Image (tube, grey):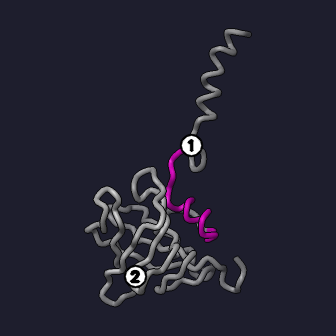
Amino acid sequence: MKRWSVLFLPLLLAACAGHGGWGGSVQCAPYAREHSGVQLRGAAASWWRQAGGRYTRTSTPEPGEVLVFRSTRRLPSGHVSVVRAVKNSRLVLVDHANWEPGRVTRRAPVEDVSPGNNWTQVRVWWTPIHGMGKTVYPAYGFIEPVLEGGSS
């Protein structure tokens, strides 16, 4: 029994040392769901379609809303982030997971660069360069975190 305990103890301690949440890998959709209250599942890009008839979708950002990125070659599942602050009509600060692999980034600037100021094209802060990324990402817009009809 003592030998079994000596062999089993390191495995038990390793299991306790895990990162917790989302299988040790932080993904954008579960993070956004937990931090916004928008109860959608699946690939981030599918949230826009899923929200139809359930949540209000808008092109005007407000704190607490979820910004939904379209699927692209770079983002095959799309991406979602939670708006924390609106700085002006073209700049918001978001919290999101896995924009930088395996990390949660808080209050990251996202800039609307769409010609119509409708948040269909955005650039995102990239911490490794301490500036806005060069890539323009297509986005659908924002999902309000309140179910249509008024309940959350």
Give the label, 1 or 2, closer to the camera.
Answer: 1
Q: What residue is shown at x 65% (from left), y 27% (from top)?
A: 12
Does dot 1 land on a helix, a strand or a loop? loop
Residue 99, quarter of the rendered image: bottom left
Whichever of labels 1 and 2 marks the residue nearer the N terminus, that label is 1
Give, as a three-letter code, the residue at label 2.
Trp
Please indicate whether residue 149 sits to the left or right of residue 15 in the image.
right
Image quarter hosting the N terminus: top right
Does dot 2 land on a helix, a strand or a loop? loop
The numbered mark at residue 19 is: 1
Q: What residue is shown at x 50% (from left), y 48% (from top)?
A: 25
Residue 39, quarter of the rendered image: bottom right
Relative to 18, is 43 above or below?
A: below
Residue 49 in picture, x, y percent from top left = 52, 76
The residue carrying pointer 2 sits among few (fewer than 14), some (14 to 19) or many (20 or more) residues within 10 Å by Cα, namely: many
Please indicate whether residue 138 sits to the left or right of residue 32 in the image.
left
Principal secondary structure, stretch drawn in magenta: helix
- Looking at the image, do the residues carrying marks 1 and 2 touch, with CB atoms under 8 Å apart? no
Residue 88, quarter of the rendered image: bottom left
Q: Nearer the viewer, residue 145 or 74?
A: 145
Q: Nearer the viewer, residue 14 or 58?
A: 14
Q: What residue is shown at x 59% (from left), y 35% (from top)?
A: 17
Q: Is residue 57 magenta?
A: no
Give the residues drawn in magenta, as a range.
24-39
The numbered mark at residue 150 is: none
Report the label total. Answer: 2
The numbered mark at residue 119 is: 2
Give, as a three-letter code, the residue at label 1.
His
Relative to 147, is 8 above or below?
A: above
Relative to 58, is 20 above or below?
A: above
